[in-house]
Image (cartoon, helix red, strand yellow):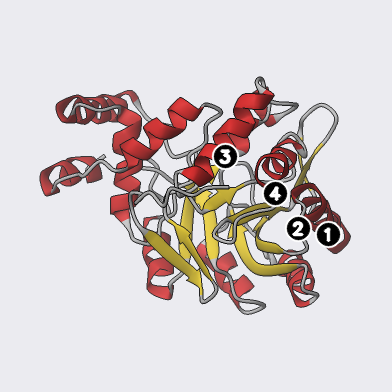
Amino acid sequence: MANTETTLPGGTFTMADDLTVTRLGYGAMQLAGPGVFGPPKDHDEALAVLRAVVEAGITHIDTADFYGPFVTNRLIKEALHPYPESLHIVTKIGSVRDDQGNWLHARSASQLREQIESNLENLGLDQIEVANVRVGGQDRPEEGSIASVFEGAAALQSEGLVKHLGLSTVNAAQIAEAQAIAPIVTVQNFYNIANREDDDLVDSLAAQGISYAPYFPLGGFSPLQSSTLSSVAERLGTRPMAVAVAWLLHRSPNILLIPGTSSVAHLRDNIAGAGLVLDDETLAQLNSL
């Protein structure tokens, strides 16, 4: 598959010696049906989006076998396999879906193994390059030790089924606990311009050379915050989403973006929006949110 090698906003980030990705990635979650459950509304468009991701020069796709479930991984395989060497797929384990679409914890060693094996099969891979271990709730960490869960994931790494490990929905103490067991290359938590509880964590991970991938980048805004964001966007002649995404790229060099869409046109809008340059005055206004 051709790669136009477009220069993407934000450049690249080296997650490990053998793993450098574009900071602007793509999140596959929206390719599944409503509620991230069931098949896509437009199968052919979903395949076209994934192919457009690679053609745009994006080298980082975020997915999970519990999206659908199994839907997004199978679409990725159908659209892109055999994968170009430049493409890096990051998946998540620690959760499954029931027949009604409920999100259930699945964190025992045997459950993690089943999930990795399912990801491997549905993606058509012999090894998962990065597996994020999801140990918290939907959008916030859950207090308590994660040692037993992460030990199960580390065992899969030692067997060669996973190359690199990450964490999702965790706090600083849990990250330190995991690092005493095995290295991590990324953390994926809820964070955006208006929900900045992880500010210190972002900076701490940056100092360690560990990437941070925020999810739900635009959720949870108050009316005042939305008004401020909209006024900045209007002044810059762009959309509020573009401002919020561009702010994340400006926030710290270790932040990786994984905006999702099921539309090729929207994908191109996301790429263009992420390239928005924010001057110091605008950044100061946005940082005050």
Residue 213, how many percent across, how many down? 48, 53
Q: How many marks?
A: 4
Q: Quadrant of the C terminus?
A: top left
- Going from N to C along the chain, the mark reached first, 3 or 2, is 3
Horizontal side of 240 relative to 156 (left or right) equals: left
Helix, strand or loop at mark 4: loop
Q: Are marks 1 and 2 in contact (CB under 8 Å)?
A: no
- Going from N to C along the chain, the mark reached first, 4 or 2, is 4
- Tell me the crowding category of disc 1: few under 14, some 14 to 19, or many 20 or more residues within 10 angstroms, Cα based: some
Residue 246, how many percent across, how many down? 31, 43
Kind of residue indicated by mark 4: His
Q: Which residue is mark 3?
A: 51
Residue 280 higher or lower than 35, as above or below? below
- The Cα atoms of the two marked residues, 1 and 2, are separated by 23 Å
The residue drawn where x is 15% and y is 27% is: 235
- The Cα atoms of the two marked residues, 4 and 2, are separated by 9 Å
- The Cα atoms of the two marked residues, 3 and 1, are separated by 35 Å
- Going from N to C along the chain, the mark reached first, 1 or 4, is 4
Q: Which residue is mark 4?
A: 81
- Tell me the crowding category of disc 2: few under 14, some 14 to 19, or many 20 or more residues within 10 angstroms, Cα based: some
- Tell me the crowding category of disc 4: few under 14, some 14 to 19, or many 20 or more residues within 10 angstroms, Cα based: some
- Going from N to C along the chain, the mark reached first, 1 or 2, is 1
Viewer-nearest of labels 1 and 4? 4
Kind of residue indicated by mark 1: Ser
Q: Which residue is mark 1?
A: 108
- Going from N to C along the chain, the mark reached first, 3 or 1, is 3
Viewer-nearest of labels 1 and 2? 2
- The Cα atoms of the two marked residues, 1 and 4, are separated by 30 Å
In this view, the residue in front, 183 or 64, is 64
Kind of residue indicated by mark 3: Arg
Helix, strand or loop at mark 2: loop
